[in-house]
Amino acid sequence: MLKVNLSDTIAAISTATGSGGIGIVRISGSQAIELADSLFVSPSGKRLKESRSHMIHYGNIVCDDKIIDEVLVTVMKAPNTYTREDVVEINTHGGFRAVTAVLDAVIKKGARLAEPGEFTKRAFLNGRIDLTQAEAVADIINAKTDKSRDIAIARLKGSLSAEIKDIRENILTMLANIEAAIAYPEHDDETMTRSMIEKGTREALEKVDRLIATADMGRIYREGIKTVILGKPNVGKSSLLNALLEEDRAIVTDIPGTTRDVVSEFINVGGIPLNIIDTAGIRDTDNVIEKIGVERSRSLAREADLILLMFDGSSRLSSEDRELMSLTKGKRTIVLINKLDLEQKLDLRDMDAIGISVKNNVGIYRLYDKIKEMFGAGDIENSNEALISGERNKASLHKAKQSLENVIETLEGSMPEDFVSMDLTAAYEALGEITGETLEEDIIDKIFSEFCLGK
């Protein structure tokens, strides 16, 4: 990614591609207002550079004596803007040609096309938000459910930042006490100092452990539960997917082997996003293409967060069924016995199975309730606790945890304060990686490169 030059004035389209009511071209930088003013013509003769902050103006964008579009232009002056720089937003008519023509004119006047995530990166570099809040912006944009969005908004408002800041400040206080004890040993009550450090470290460790415990749920709300529908051919997997989506997304026939590739969609179960995947039926086959699909099904089952294991209640247990039971051993699994509308020949009561009839839409809500019970949706719904999100944050917390555990081990072994100080410093820096205060520049670049263009 381009190393950000904060002296550049940048521009990009900030609305989605396609036709719509409006399109927005966003400009940020020291020359943003002057640049927009050189293109804007108001019927009243009003100049943008004479405008008060956070005012909207009607007029035309004109380039080379040609009207590009009729627009509304918002002028926002630093520091009270998204990037803490001067920002101008040009509201054009929606549609690809109108908005790109305005962007082309802005770039022709001297702006540079922004890199993906560069507006948010400038907000971070200019100190308006930290890295947890920047990542929350991306999570809000990509939220699959209202709860996913609510959790991201809480982080954008600083819920996780406040937790991390509190732990780091406590560690910093302990480091200051240690440094004072080393510098002025004649004033040091060693027993009292080491006791205080151990107590503070255990408190910090408890808070870090609590955050780590939210990692899996944070990932689920961010990425969705990777849910695989597994079963032998013609058990009703594609019909179940269609029933959950309430649309005919997957092809359903009586011919075994119809589904040969994976079909993936997101659904909302009580606020929990499910990335639900219909797979090829697992069976022995000589068909080369179907065989590839079967192998993919096995691979997806190994990677899944949740397996919906389907059996045909109107048939006796087969060798394929037994293979599936073996394949899902040790995995989070919900067993479904389909085709309750037919005469039942299968009894899996020992497996705590849910009986359903996809054809008659029977038992689907029992499945929803089971998923919510398994993944603790109620705990999150009524909780204001910060959730961490993403493997980067989880890895940093584990590094901090290890360093804090080293501190306790060092204290219990009556080792010198220098060793305690080193491990506390390591924990302090690991936690700083989460907010971006001690993170290497190339990793920060990588994080923002995954943002959409214009944000």
Image (cartoon, grey):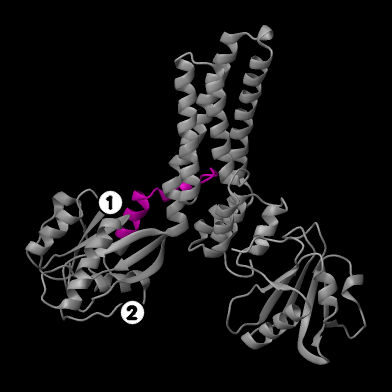
- Give the residue displayed 16% in from the left and 77% down from the top: 288
Q: Amino acid at mark 2?
A: Asp
Taken as a whole, is the magenta stretch helix, strand or loop? helix
When the figure is inspected, residue 37 is found, relative to residue 297, above or below; the finding is below
- Give the residue displayed 21% in from the left and 54% down from the top: 328
When the figure is inspected, residue 24 is found, relative to residue 374, above or below; the finding is below
Q: Where's residue 44, x and y in %?
A: 92, 83
Q: Is residue 41 magenta?
A: no
Question: Picture quarter containing residue 113?
Answer: bottom right
- Position of 276 with respect to 41 (left or right) is left
Which element is circle 1 on?
Answer: loop
Residue topped by disc 1: 332
Q: Where's residue 367, x and y in %?
A: 30, 59
Residue topped by disc 2: 248
Q: Residue furthest bottom?
A: 66
- Position of 184 with respect to 367 (left or right) is right
Q: Amino acid at mark 1?
A: Arg
Question: Badges 1 and 2: C-beta atoms under 8 Å apart?
Answer: no
When the figure is inspected, residue 309 is found, relative to residue 294, above or below; the finding is above
Which element is circle 2 on?
Answer: loop
**Residue 372: numbered disc:** none
- Give the residue displayed 10% in from the left and 70% down from the top: 284
- Earlier along the polypeptide chain: callout 1 or callout 2? 2
Question: Picture quarter containing residue 56?
Answer: bottom right
Seen from the viewer's position, the closer of residues 451 and 206 is 451
- Position of 290 with respect to 272 (left or right) is left
Q: Where's residue 348, x and y in %?
A: 13, 55
Q: Is residue 367 magenta?
A: yes
Q: Is residue 106 visible?
A: yes
Q: Where's residue 438, x and y in %?
A: 60, 43
- Give the residue displayed 85% in from the left and 77% down from the top: 37
Q: Nearer the viewer, mark 1 or mark 2?
A: 1
